[in-house]
Image (cartoon, coloured by chain):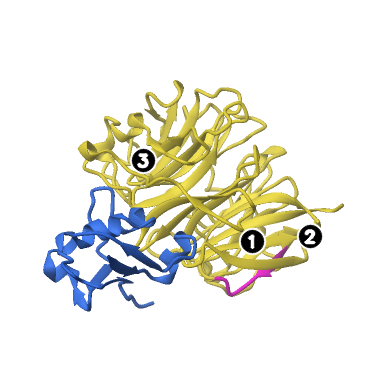
Amino acid sequence: MVRVIVPSVLAVQAEGRQHFEVEADTVGEALRALPVADLLFNERGEWSRHLNVFVDGTDAREQGGPACPLAGAREILVVAMLSGG
Amino acid sequence: MAIGVLALVGTRKGLFRLRGDDDRRGWQVDGPLLDGWGVYHATVDSRDGTVYAAANHVVYGPTVQRSADGGKTWQRSKKISLPAWSDLTVNAAWHIEPGLPQEPGTLYLGADPGVLFRSDDAGATWEPNLGILEHPTRDRWFPGAGGLCCDSIQLDPRDPQRMYVCIASAGTLRTGDGGKTWLPVNKNVAADYLPSPYGEIGQCVHKLLLHPARPDRLWQQNHCGVYRSDDCGDSWQRLDGNGLPSGFGFPIMIDPNDPDTAFVIPERGHEYHYSPDAQFAVYRTRDGGQTWEEMSDGLPKPAWAAVLREASASDADSVYFGTQSGSFFALAGGTWVEAARHLPPILSVEVTQWSV
């Protein structure tokens, strides 16, 4: 079981829930289990390029992106990329 | 019970509701709803009162959101998608047009990249229109600064088979068979940025409106002038050589009771996009575009205003618009009332009635 934490704009789209506990083998599986999965992936199944995902503090993009194995991970943190203006 | 006006004002950071008195002088502001989303367009479906919003987010992408309780709670449509074989993905949701009264549950959605969707389940799901997606001229369409946006969808109230869509920059397309096939209708409409400026396709329509009382009449604010058609788009007459300081602008407004009346907000063209010589004004014609009169009483001067293509609306009593600097104006007795200021940049405006 891994805990997924999403930002506030996404939480509003999930009836106010900011934390989820899901069973998954990869980051992609975990995010697809969320009620906001449609907002995290485009119609080709790719992550938004403005989305950062950290698994126990490590950038999941460096570990294969959606294929990043969870293998005992405790927390997935979804972060909307910071932008100025 | 007094009847006032409810303006749905979409901004870069959410949707605001502005309630105006029946004289359009006193206003109350609340919002933002859909906090943090860029609301390119929001509208009330007069058939059942549902509010629909084309809401886009730089990280989370394009969505259609709908509310059956006036904006208290929202439901997201199933993901708007294009088929894999098209090699296209949806970049932004632009405009939502409820269907005719005789087709309850049907709505249309215009989106970037130059695509039209239809819903027959009150916005729960959306299917792409293949006649637009596979249009034989698509390889000659190209995006403007706002993307390849489909921002105008107009339905002929006499004939459910006939409708118009506009895509920048493809031009106006008309169907007479319910959306199976689409005919470009851009005769005499300039595309000054092309080597052949009067071609079949490639025009940059900023906003097109069909007049509900005379449905053969269309008004168009284009990148290259203001136009009127009296024959369902078969031919167009250019109208901006007779009093307008510029033919360039984005929105156009009409008087639903008078097919000869229209309003435009000229801007210095092409690369500039602000009021010509800082003279911020709306121009009105009451003779079908033969002459134009300035209406600037109540507007700030000097001002370098910019009003986007979806950021205006009209009803039987007034006209309304919002600026990129976050001011919302309504016309009250010949004078513009600044109903709100310091909103986020305004992307869209629609109005409906409400009861006090």
Chain displayed in yellow: B
Instruction: From the viewer's perspective, tell me whether residue B288 is left or right of residue A24.
Output: right
Chain displayed in blue: A
Image position of B275 with respect to B52: above or below: below
Instruction: From the viewer's perspective, tell me whether residue A59 is left or right of residue A81.
Output: left
Residue hosting label 3 = B115
Instruction: From the viewer's perspective, tell me whether residue B106 is left or right of residue B254.
Output: left
Residue under the point 65% across and 70% down: B340
x and y percent of residue B270 in the render? 39, 59
Image position of B269 with respect to B174: above or below: below
Rounded to the nearest whole Å, what is the CA distance between mark 1 and mark 3?
Answer: 29 Å
Residue under the point 45% across and 63% down: B273
Most frequent secondary structure within the magenta stretch: strand
Quadrant of the snapshot with the C terminus of chain B: bottom right
Chain where mark 3 sits: B
Image position of A20 with respect to B96: above or below: below
Residue under the point 85% across and 53% down: B2
- What is the secondary structure assignment of the residue under circle 2? loop
Q: Nearer the viewer, residue B304 or B88?
A: B88
Label 2 vs 3, first from the N-terminus: 2
Q: Of the numbered discs in the image, which one, if any, rests on residue B21?
A: 2
Q: Nearer the viewer, residue A62 or B34?
A: A62
x and y percent of residue B240 in the render? 53, 48
Image position of B206 with respect to B101: above or below: below
- What is the secondary structure assignment of the residue under circle 1? strand
x and y percent of residue B237 in the render? 51, 36
Mark 2 closeness class: few <14, some 14–19, many ≥20 residues within 10 Å: some
Q: What stretch is highlighted in magenta?
A: B336-343
Q: Of the numbered discs in the image, which one, if any, rests on residue B17?
A: 1
